[in-house]
């Protein structure tokens, strides 16, 4: 995996994803003893943000620092990129300074151009199409609360957005039965479903799309949702709420159709009273803050996976 870009999650083979999650668990357990605290010594990570971020910004900053590396947080308006310097020139120049570039961008195509021009690994930290680093944390959280991933059922209710698209791929790689319930016209993106279907044929996963939230949630081990109004869609907020509400809100009635003890996940930021009720997100089956914490541990594991050689990786034992 050393040196590869991480744009969709489909760059990982099923066994590589499992190893990464195992490493994240080891990192989590060994954190207090400083496991891997020199792993990225002398290495820098450029972090480019075209959109706001709390979890991604802070977890990447802390992850890089705890691994002994140097994080450089940059908004696109601070870079010449914001004044028209090309993505390609930015990628070439940054590659002469840093060992990894992570970017949160408006359009996925920008990331593909950045990855093509950069000589160092490029990590997608959210585009309009995918949010793969989020799904690493979601999968670790699911495994912690519900055991081995293969054969679990996961229901997505709401917008077939960037997080949902990455979930179709994460589920496919993990042998999960994933059912996304969205209003008609808001289904997950076709390229994500194509990747998921190709991967599922070898892992036994099932990735399905429906317009019926109750059908999706029936017997699920985990129910997930996300905002109805992703960043950049603010002008469409009122129209979107009309489409999604009330049917696609995750409330206790819908949760009661899932398997007994089913967990609730949300990548955050959340909007209580919109995509989820306060009762569910603040209730006993919600694991959203474990999920947010796991952004840190999975990010450490991802950085080590992309930047270290096999022998260095194997040395990371608690
Ligand atoms: N979940 C997530 O990516 O949060 P931020 O937008 O705060 O980074
Ligand atoms: N779908 C949301 C995720 C935020 C982390 C967005 O793109 O705004």
Image (cartoon, rainbow, N blue to C red):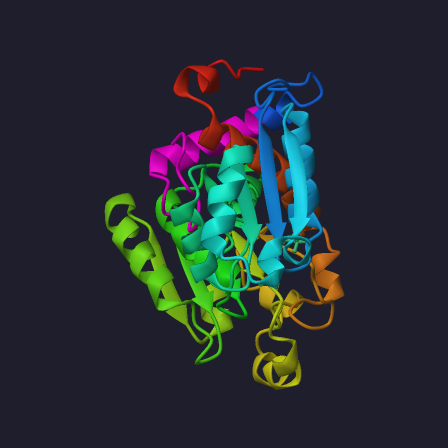
Q: Position of residue 41 (x, y in %)?
A: 60, 20
Q: Could you tell whether 44 is left or right of 129 in the image?
A: right
Which residue is at 61% across, 55% downward? 80
Q: Could you tell whether 72 is left or right of 110 in the image?
A: right
Q: Quadrant of ligand 2?
A: bottom right
Q: Position of residue 117 (x, y in %)?
A: 41, 47
Q: Residue 176: tell me if it is visible.
A: no
* 188 or 225: nearer the viewer: 188
Q: Position of residue 103 (x, y in %)?
A: 55, 50
Q: Quadrant of residue 165?
A: bottom left
Q: Position of residue 125 (x, y in %)?
A: 55, 50
Residue 219 falls inside the magenta stretch: no
Q: Could you tell whether 188 is left or right of 104 in the image?
A: left
Which residue is at 69% across, 34% downward? 62
Magenta segment boundaries in residue numbering:
1-26
Please identify the quadrant where the N terminus is shown.
top left
* 260 or 4: nearer the viewer: 4
Residue 25 falls inside the magenta stretch: yes
Q: Is residue 143 above or below residue 30?
A: below
């Amino acid at each position: 995996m050393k040196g590869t870009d991480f744009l969709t999650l489909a760059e990982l083979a099923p066994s590589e994803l499992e190893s990464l999650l195992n490493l994240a668990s080891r990192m989590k357990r060994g954190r207090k003893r400083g496991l891997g605290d020199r792993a990225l010594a002398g290495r820098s990570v450029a972090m480019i943000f075209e959109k706001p971020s709390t979890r991604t910004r802070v977890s990447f900053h802390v992850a890089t620092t705890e691994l002994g590396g140097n994080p450089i947080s940059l908004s696109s308006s601070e870079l010449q990129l914001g004044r028209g310097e090309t993505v390609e020139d930015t990628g070439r120049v940054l590659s002469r300074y840093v060992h990894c570039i992570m970017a949160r961008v408006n359009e996925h195509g920008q990331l593909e151009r950045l990855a093509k021009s950069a000589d160092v690994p490029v990590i997608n930290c959210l585009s309009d199409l995918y949010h793969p680093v989020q799904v690493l944390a979601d999968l670790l959280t699911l495994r912690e609360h519900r055991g081995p991933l293969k054969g679990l059922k996961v229901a997505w209710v709401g917008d077939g957005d960037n997080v949902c698209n990455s979930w179709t791929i994460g589920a496919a790689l993990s042998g999960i039965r994933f059912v996304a319930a969205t209003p008609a016209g808001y289904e997950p993106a076709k390229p994500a479903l194509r990747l998921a279907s190709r991967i599922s044929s070898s892992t036994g996963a099932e990735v399905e799309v429906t317009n019926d939230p109750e059908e999706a949630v029936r017997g699920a081990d985990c129910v997930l949702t996300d905002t109805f109004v992703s960043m950049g869609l603010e002008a469409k907020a009122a129209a979107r709420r009309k489409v999604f509400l009330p049917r696609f809100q995750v409330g206790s009635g819908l949760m009661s159709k899932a398997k007994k003890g089913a967990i609730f996940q949300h990548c955050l930021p959340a909007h209580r009273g919109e995509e989820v009720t306060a009762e569910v997100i603040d209730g006993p089956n919600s694991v959203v803050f474990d999920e947010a914490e796991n952004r840190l541990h999975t990010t450490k594991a991802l950085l080590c996976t992309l930047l270290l050689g096999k022998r260095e990786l194997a040395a990371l034992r608690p």
